[in-house]
Amino acid sequence: MAGQGHKPGVTRESASDQEMRDQEVLRANKELAAYFKGRRTEREARAALKIIKAFVRDRERRGAKNRPPLPGAAPAKTPKKITNRNAATGERHRRKPRRQPKGTLSDSATASSTPQLDPPPPQSSESDERTPE
């Protein structure tokens, strides 16, 4: 049997090997970050970068469907049940229309064009909606 039914881009690793490699990549990432903070030497950073680059190359060789999640990242979440009943039925909360300010431009224009015999009592600076304490 000369030809094996093996795809060149697919590698079969056990779950423990994959877990060990993920841990190695996470450690290399921390080493590289430590280099930029001045806590590691350039030699250590280059070694960490080789590990990361090998991981990226291997990941690029795999098909998009066969790629496991990135190390340290949470796996893709499945959609949860909808807890908001209004969202499930498609109803949306409607806002109340905005209240018009008391002294609008159209009111002041009509008030200035018609003479007033008795001026209105002056308004206090406090709101009428407040209750006395």
Image (cartoon, grey):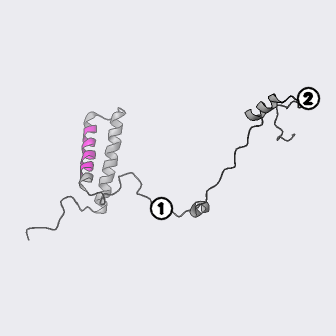
39 w.r.t. 70: above or below: above
Dot 1: what SS? loop
Q: Nearer the viewer, mark 2 or mark 1?
A: 2
In the rendered structure, the answer to whether residue 83 lies left or right of residue 95 reads: left
| Percent x, y of residue 61 | 23, 54
| Percent x, y of residue 44 | 27, 38
Cα–Cα gap, marks 2 and 1: 69 Å
Q: Which residue does the numbered mark 1 point to in the structure image?
A: 79
Q: Nearer the viewer, residue 38 or 80?
A: 80
Residue 110 image-quadrant placement: top right
User: Which range is magenta?
Assistant: 44-57
Residue drawn at the location 13% of the way across and 67% of the way down: 4
**Residue 48 lies in the magenta-colored region:** yes
Q: Which residue does the numbered mark 2 point to in the structure image?
A: 117
70 w.r.t. 29: above or below: below
| Percent x, y of residue 74 | 42, 54
In the rendered structure, the answer to whether residue 90 lies left or right of residue 51 reads: right
Q: Amino acid at mark 2?
A: Leu
In the rendered structure, the answer to whether residue 3 lies left or right of residue 18 reads: left
Q: Nearer the viewer, residue 123 or 5?
A: 123
